[in-house]
Amino acid sequence: MIRSLDPPKRLLLGPGPSMVHPRVLQALSTPLIGHLDPAFLAIMNDLQSRLRHLFSTANRMTIALSGTGSAGMEAAIVNVVEPGDAVIVGVNGVFGTRLATVVERCGGTAIRVEAPWGQIIPPDMIETTLRRTGPVKAVALVHAETSTGAWQPIEPIGRLCRDHDTLLIVDAVTSLGGVPVEVDQWSIDVCYSGTQKCLSCPPGLAPLTVSARAMDAISRRRTPCRSWYLDLSLIADYWAEGTRAYHHTAPISMLYALHEALCLIEEEGLPARFARHRLNGDALVAGLAALDLPPLPLDEHRLPMLTCVTVPAHIDEAAVRQQLLQTFGIEIGGGLGPLKGKVWRIGLMGESSTEANVLMLLNAVEELFIRSGWLSTPGHALQAATRIYNRGL
Ligand SMILES: *Cc1c(COP(=O)(O)O)cnc(C)c1O
């Protein structure tokens, strides 16, 4: 029996959760106020305007949904899709596959546009499909495919969706806060994220923004949303300043934490934050390449905050991950689905994205490779990473 909570100290360099800043942990222990208290309304308003800045949008309906990133995914689909609707879904990894599943569970038809895992969905494949299928309700894509490290271009697809008068739904769970997410400029209609990736907050909320166009489509549904808990027309009445109607009790402490995480993001500044993710991602990739661990996606489609590298067959990848955790207290991720046993997924998200963490991980991997006889001379990975850090000097 665990009589008092004392989890081990870990350095979180997996696909989420990421490290959390002490100020965010402190915010979690702030005394509660009621979720209908006028003072809480002021916090919600401020949180909304910070989220709008982060999503680069003027959307009124910009909120933090109760639940993890998957709740954001489910809300996006269950509100937009009615039974019989067709939705084009980009499928090139775990999360695109899930999007298609959710569309089908909502009674929709998922038209899958597939690409091999590790690659992006070419925008012209979406265009061809839009032309071939005729009107569809929406196109749904994953911006940052966390299962493969692929970075999906969204802007050209946003233009296509406008031309074909279809809604664009984008999963920005891993991308938000690590690379630009330009909701208005890219014509995204529904965009959702999660708190435990590049926002460096514990899991539990799904930032969500919905365009007026999409809210209009939702209000014109022929059938009520099949989920009562995630019904955005009801949730909008809680977040709207005029109504503030009780729907469900807001997870107050989580909203405190997200608010503090957004303050930290604004203090750093988005351009500096994106540059930090890019630099540390590049240094990690250079270091891993020196250990013969090449990235899965092409360089131009490689995410900075999630590095997916192929591990050669002679290396016992699961044993190394276990040693990293047990000996060094470092968590990294393994492969999912068809990539199980073949790749590592290393997250440098939010607070986890630092030079010290990159060098610590590379050093630990080198050490374990030497102990197992897979490497004879140490130092190459750190040298390669250091060259990236010294690039600008
Ligand atoms: C993590 C993740 C999700 C799911 O988020 P949870 O917080 O685990 O529910 C969805 N999409 C992508 C791209 C993710 O990386």
Image (cartoon, rainbow, N blue to C red):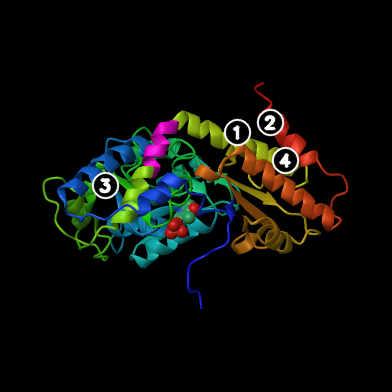
Disc 2 versus disc 3: distance between alpha carbons? 43 Å
Q: Residues within 10 Å of mark 3 (few under 14, many from 20)?
A: many
Of the residues under marks 4 and 3, which one precedes in the sequence? 3
Q: Secondary structure at mark 1?
A: helix
- Which residue type carries mark 1? Leu
The magenta stretch is 261-269
- Which residue type carries mark 2? Ile
Q: Secondary structure at mark 2?
A: helix
Q: Residue furthest front?
A: 4
Q: Are marks 1 and 2 in contact (CB under 8 Å)?
A: yes
At 63% from the left and 44% from the top, the residue drawn is 357
Locate the C terminus and report the quarter of the image it occupies. top right
Q: Tell us which disc is closer to us: 1 or 3.
A: 1
Disc 1 versus disc 2: distance between alpha carbons? 8 Å
Q: Which residue is mark 2?
A: 388
Q: Secondary structure at mark 4?
A: helix
Main secondary-structure element of the magenta-colored stretch: helix
Q: Tell us which disc is closer to us: 2 or 3.
A: 2
Disc 4 versus disc 3: distance between alpha carbons? 44 Å
The quarter of the picture where residue 221 lies is bottom left
From the top left corner, tell me how far across and down residue 373 is, in percent. 87, 56
Of the residues under marks 1 and 3, which one precedes in the sequence? 3
From the top left corner, tell me how far across and down residue 311 is, in percent. 73, 54
As drawn, 279 above or below 198: above
Q: Residues within 10 Å of mark 4 (few under 14, many from 20)?
A: many
As drawn, 129 above or below 181: below
Q: Residue furthest left?
A: 242
Q: Which residue is mark 3?
A: 214
Query: Residue 287 bears which disc, if any?
Result: 4
Disc 1 versus disc 3: distance between alpha carbons? 36 Å
Of the residues under marks 1 and 2, which one precedes in the sequence? 1
Whether disc 1's CB lies below 8 Å from ligand 1 is answered: no
